[in-house]
Amino acid sequence: MTISTARLARRRAKDIAFKAFCVLVTVLALTALAAILWSLLTQGLGGLNLDVFTRSTPAPGSRGGLANAIVGSIAMCGLAMVIALAVGILAGTWLAEYGGRSAYGAVIRFLNDVLLSAPSILVGLFVYEILVAPFHTFSGLAGAVALAMLAIPVIVRTTEDVLLLQAATLREAGVALGAPLSFVIRTILWRSAQSGLLTGALLAFARISGETAPLLFTALNYQFFSLDLRHPTASLPVVIFNFALSAYDDWRRLAWAGALLIAGAVLAVTIVARIVAQEQKRS
Amino acid sequence: MSDATLPRTAPPIRRANPKGALVAVVFEWLCCGAATMLLVALGWLLFSLVLGGWPALRKFGFGFLTTATWNPVTDVYGAAGPIMGTLVTAALALAIALPIAGGVAFFLTELCPAPLRRPIGTAVELLAGIPSIVYGMWGLFVFAPLFSRFVQLPMMAAAAPGSLLEKLTTGIPNGSGILSASIILAIMILPFMAATLRELLLTVPASVRESAYGLGATTAEVVMSVTLPYVRTGAIGAVMLGLGRALGETMAVTFIIGNSHTFPKSLFDSGSTIASTIANEFTEASTPMHTASLIALGLVLFVITFIVLGLARLMLRNQVAKA
């Protein structure tokens, strides 16, 4: 009897230690993450004013904002999303509806998974090699292509997943009416999966809007307001990177404001994506 | 017999080509082409890295991987410093983040009071999406000064001369360095790993857990000997995905690792990773050999992450297939 109580006590102690550890690390992790959000808010809100949205990046010591970077970011992300949606949805559709079960399909799916978490700086290097070096100029277009390469795997993945979730009866009903499969896909499956596709697009957008590494040597940076993507283009993440590492206090303030803007935008887009996904689940 | 009775001269029934038949074929080819673009992109990426890095690999040979001289002035490059920095920071980050992420995931699936479960789970998932540059900035401006004051200085003061601790803690106590970078990386991959582990643990059928509890197992025993083994492969996959992120992360590291190309000698020593070296130097590369060496570094990173991610994905797939 004494042995078994000792055993029980040991098990209980282990259990309590385990639980205490779990609670402790959760508190620790949430504290660290809350600390990050807190300094982001306090430091970022201090630098946020109307100038940030209306003026271009300044020389140190003079008045300025992030307007060119914000616009550049939006333009590059927008173009990247157009490319990524076109390629990603088609490729995801192929995986779900046509060739997904073949050996080739398995290879493509695996490569997509690899691309999904490939280091973004390598994508930057790659795009530099194919779109910057041959044309002898950094350009917003190259930046957009680099971002698209990061968005495509996300969209392929979600497209395949949501299409596979659609009921087989939908396809059968369409085909039984005599419609070719391609017609069924475009008019029935895509439509019934549209909120899922939207979720994927939003998640991809959230992912690329904060990416810095692939833009460093594709879009580079540009000091003035410009909408011409054939030339170097400013973007929020790159401006934040340059300004944060500078020695000027006003540049650092702008960097914090920019970081707050990006984090806020990413969080907002992610939350919208989750709401869309939940709506879909409910309907 | 019956064939002969058919009127052979009757005009063949000509069906109109179904409308959209061509569209169907074109559409299928478009889809297939888009899928093939993934293959082309990854293959081309590898090819352009090999091509771009070839001059450096040919000139320095195997020594590129094993020597630690990185000198743009004399145009001699050896990548052992950044490679070691990448491996060490990623491994340390994983060692720090893994127990914490596990603890958070267990807390959320087993211990957390029901009303808090969803909010905390959602918060963790949302934090996984915060851009890494934010973590980097926080590391540089907020974490580094605190780390220097409350960890580096006391530890260096406490280290007895000649002891192992002294060896591990030599360096400039300015808050940046290998260990700081690892901690920031750990904080960055933590939400992602916790969220993935939690999702995996939620796939364990309730009946499995309930029967373990029903046999009188404590929470620790249920987690350690029932639910965790149930998701073993998937969990390893999730960990390796986290490792892959840590290996390839650029921004969170560049801010705080100190950016020196020497072979890191201690935890507080400044160092560099492959990604941070490329980010810092690529646009300012002075000679073709410098550029080639940076691209060759990228190739090394590609190979390392490809192996890690490949293994991770295979394991996660098997787990999902099983679930």
Image: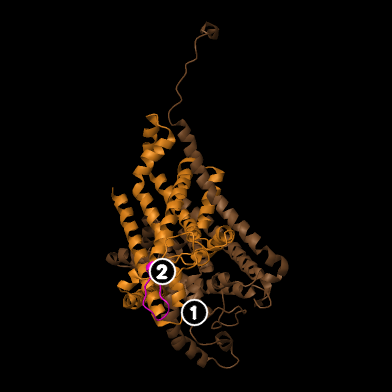
Q: Position of residue B44 (x, y in %)?
A: 59, 54
What's the distance in space between the residues labelled 1 and 2, CA to CA? 32 Å
Q: The disc labelled 2 sits on which kind of residue?
A: Ala
Q: Secondary structure at mark 1?
A: helix
Q: Which residues are magenta?
A: A56-67
Which colouring convention does the figure follow? by chain
Question: Given contact means CB atoms under 8 Å apart, are the residues at marks 1 and 2 in contact?
Answer: no
Q: Residue at x 34, y 75 (%)?
A: A44
- Mark 1 belongs to which subunit? B
In the current view of this chain or complex, which residue is farthest to the left? B115
Vertical comparison of B129 with A163: above or below: below
- The residue to which callout 1 is attached is B180
Using the image as rendered, state which of residue B149 and residue A148 is in the foreground.
A148
Chain coloured brown here: B
Residue B290 appears in which quarter of the rendering? Answer: bottom right
Residue B58 in magenta stretch: no
Type of amino acid under label 1? Ser
Label 2 chain ID? B
**Residue at numbered disc 2:** B220
**Viewer-side label of 1, 2:** 1
Secondary structure that dominates the magenta span: loop
